[in-house]
Image: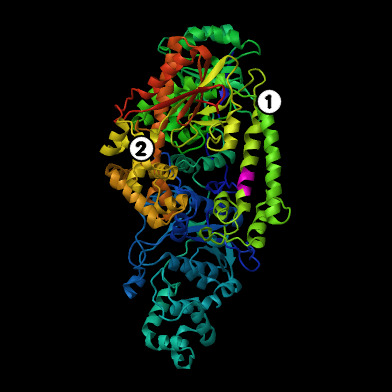
Amino acid sequence: MKLAIVVRRPCELPARTVVATLLYSPLTLHDVLDRKAAASEPVTMAKENRPLVVLIDAMGFIFRAFFAPMERLRSPSGVPTKVPYVFASMLRRLVHDWQPDYMGVVFDAAAPTFRDQLYEQYKAKRPPMPDELAVQLPYVRRLCEAARLPILEFPGYEADDVIGALACQAVDQGLEVVIVTSDKDMLQLVGKGIRVLIPTKGDLVVDARKVEELLGVPPQKVADVMALMGDLIDNIPGARGIGREGARELIRRFGSAEAALEHAAEVANKRYREALQSQRDQVLLSKQLATIATAIPVPLELERLRRAEPDYAALRGLYAELGFTSLLKELMAQGPVVRLEKVEYETLGSAAELRAFVNSLSPGQAVAVWPVLQLAEGEEPGFDSRVVGLELSTATGTARVAQIPAGQEHEVFAGLRSWLEEAARPKVTHDPKLLEMLLGPVRGIRDATMLYSYLLQPTTANHDFSEVVLRRLNVALSGAPGERADYLLRIAPLLRAEVEARGLLEVYEKIDLPLAPVLATMERRGVRVDPAALAELSAAMEEEARALERRIYELAGREFNVNSPQQLAEVLFDELQLPMPRKYGRAKARSTAVSVLQELALVHELPRKVIEYREQAKLKSTYADALPRLIHPRTGRLHTRLSQVGTATGRLSSANPNLQNIPIRTELGRKIRAAFVAEPGWRLLSADYSQIELRILAHFSQDAVLAEAFRCGEDIHALTAAEVFGVAPGLQTAEHRRVAKIINFGILYGLSPFGLAQQLGISQKEAAQFIAAYFERYPGVRAYLDGQLAEVRRTGLTRTLFGRIRPIPEINSPIPARRNLAERTALNTPFQGSAADLIKLAMIEIHRRLAQQGLRAKMILQVHDELLFEAPEEEIPALAALVKPAMEQIETFAGPLRVPLAVDIKTGSNWRDLS
């Protein structure tokens, strides 16, 4: 049976949609800009009965958006996009809240203005526009053009003057005006018919009364106040010696800057009096510079400003180009008119028809395969998800859809087995791990769109197929049967071409794709836990938590809710009078975050006990109580979801449950690990890379001393301790080694003297000396780290040993805190990512060897640098002999490592008691 399926494709929206499209975004201006609530009642935003004109000070808002405290965004091609995204959000709020009849976006002209001719130093102290901002301006203009918002700019005049002239003309013609700006100069325009909307103060609407409340003078006196106090931003000199309060006082008394100058001798304050008497010309010039020129020859063309329907096709294209997925979704949700695209999606009536279709395919024919699953609401696909259908496509616009009746899955898949396992039959899928886990062994997968998407955008959290299609093709999938297989064929070649162009094809073909069946096998096998041991541990942890609670009450002198940050802050800071940490500022001074408690624990026992209590509660709820509920009733095991696309570094992630976060250094964490056991007659084997990131550092840096130490099997921490403390290895204490270890691993994370001082409880000067001694010992490391930062600043991304990329958009951020974090990320990612790729290669090889040697042993878990196996007791020696060389002697396509890898092998009946 053939069905003609109608696929919804975006076309033109109906006229006069209530809200223009750029318009809707989950991010609002309140989310991204400083919100300072007005002290008095807010002015209503409702329109009067007159038509409304909204004029936007573009550059003022653009600069505020650029420095807004939110993560910088990047397009799929790596271009920074935060400014156009925030600008779109602002437009959304304006249209939604105000419903203006006319709108204009006013930019400063590039040419010199009359103020530059008046005063050569006007705005001279402003730094040049950051390059990262400059590249975003064309996108703001394109956004305005797509929204059909007129862009206004006039040579010789600043945006302030253009806005002032247009606003005054609009009022003369009986219109109401709202000016969108954060520039206090513009408040002088406020008056009958003109209000100012200040986005940076929580969208505060300012009328004449509010101007006087904010500045202490009415709107018509704002320029006079600025003439006296000056403006550092615009480099308006004012009168040196007269500040904000003095300027207000003088203008309130005398009425104008000129009158203050005329009556200077009457001013009692000596500093003010002398400033007025000695700087007359400077004050008059400052008033000229501060006064907005509203009488300039700029015509008000209302028809040009009339709000029109956006160019939806242009908006869709721009949003797709910039990666604005949320805006695209909102655009689609507005109900676009459907353009019919006829496709042929054929339903196959039986397993025999499905088998016949597959057998009819030519040997080299690529087939897109999409498994249709039956999932409960909120359920994630897993090893036991039921496949209720298959979608297959061999050409765009066509698909075959087969339903699989309950209980017949084995029969259907058995009929497809030869085709599924034939490597010469190319297949296209989205998630190769899921396909392998549900259908059994699948060979010949050529394209995996989820892995492509992740390689290209590792910092993007969502790689669901519908999201990938929306981002790349600007199409919202309708969910029609057959559609996903069809679109697999449409998008896969595009993504593959981009992967190849960015030098990532080898990573895909030699690491990510062959790892998928390994993870499927591990996830299907699962990990065995002892529910009785967890129940016993939960009871013991509950008793310990109650004991900690009682001790906390004793130390506090009363009972309170330990889980309430507010009540805990009252006890710590009000009742016990513990010092508030200065470094957190006023907003976080009463924080009870763990970093604050750790600092307070140095001076009082109560915060130390709260830390212990929180750890008890977290581990109890996350593991001791939760794990038994996640044991599968059929297998009696935990089947964690292992994801290849869950981290920006290339590391694997684990979820439902997350088995990578069980602490190993605390006694509680070790007790939880003791509940992870082998089945009777079997044992666990752990293979753990020793100092792999430091070895990768030696490889990258080519530091002769560090590399030689690893080649000779020397103790790196002892060598560093000897250099830093001048103490021979045989005389070193545990403290020497602890400090050396922190320094060694801290270097990988760009640890600063401040950070090291905090960790070790020493002065920054002493910490700086430790770091200097380290780099003196290993000069190649210093040279490598400096070179790495320079390269990332140049390219905006970092690479692992094998070429996996990670964008670091904040590396050139003008905000020091973000730039520092980006620098640490740029330094650490190559080590973490390279170690992750190395262990993935080892997993692929071990998986192959286990099958080749016919061992019953299973690889069941990967936790960063550790692999965990389960094997019959008699296979343990053979397993160890297989695993250790496979991990230490990896053949990489990036060339041999300059230092040897070392693996520690341990065995035991549970995950804790390994030796």
Picture disc at residue 532: 1
Closer to us: 6 or 36: 36
Q: Which residue lies furthest to the left in this view?
A: 704
Name the mark nearer the viewer: 2 or 1.
2
- In the rendered image, residue 795, in percent from the top left (x then y), is placed at 33, 43
**Amino acid type of the residue that numbered disc 2 sits on in the rendered structure:** Ile
As drawn, is 411 to the left or to the right of 72?
A: right
* Position in image of residue 575 (x %, y %): 67, 61
Relative placement, left or right, of 847 versus 415 is left
Task: Please report contact status of discs 2 and 1: CB closer than 8 Å, yes or no.
Answer: no
Q: Position of residue 103 (x, y in %)?
A: 51, 57
Q: Does the magenta stretch include residue 612?
A: yes
Overall secondary structure of the magenta stretch?
helix
Which kind of residue does numbered mark 1 sit on? Ala
- Which residue corresponds to the image point at 34% horizontal and 37% vertical from the top-left? 697
Q: Is residue 214 visible?
A: yes
Q: Position of residue 151 (x, y in %)?
A: 44, 56
693 relative position to 251: left or right: left
Visible residue check, residue 445: no
Q: Quadrant of residue 826?
A: top left
Q: In this view, does 272 lie above or below 798?
A: below
The region drawn magenta spans: 609-614
Task: Give the residue at mark 2.
Answer: 716
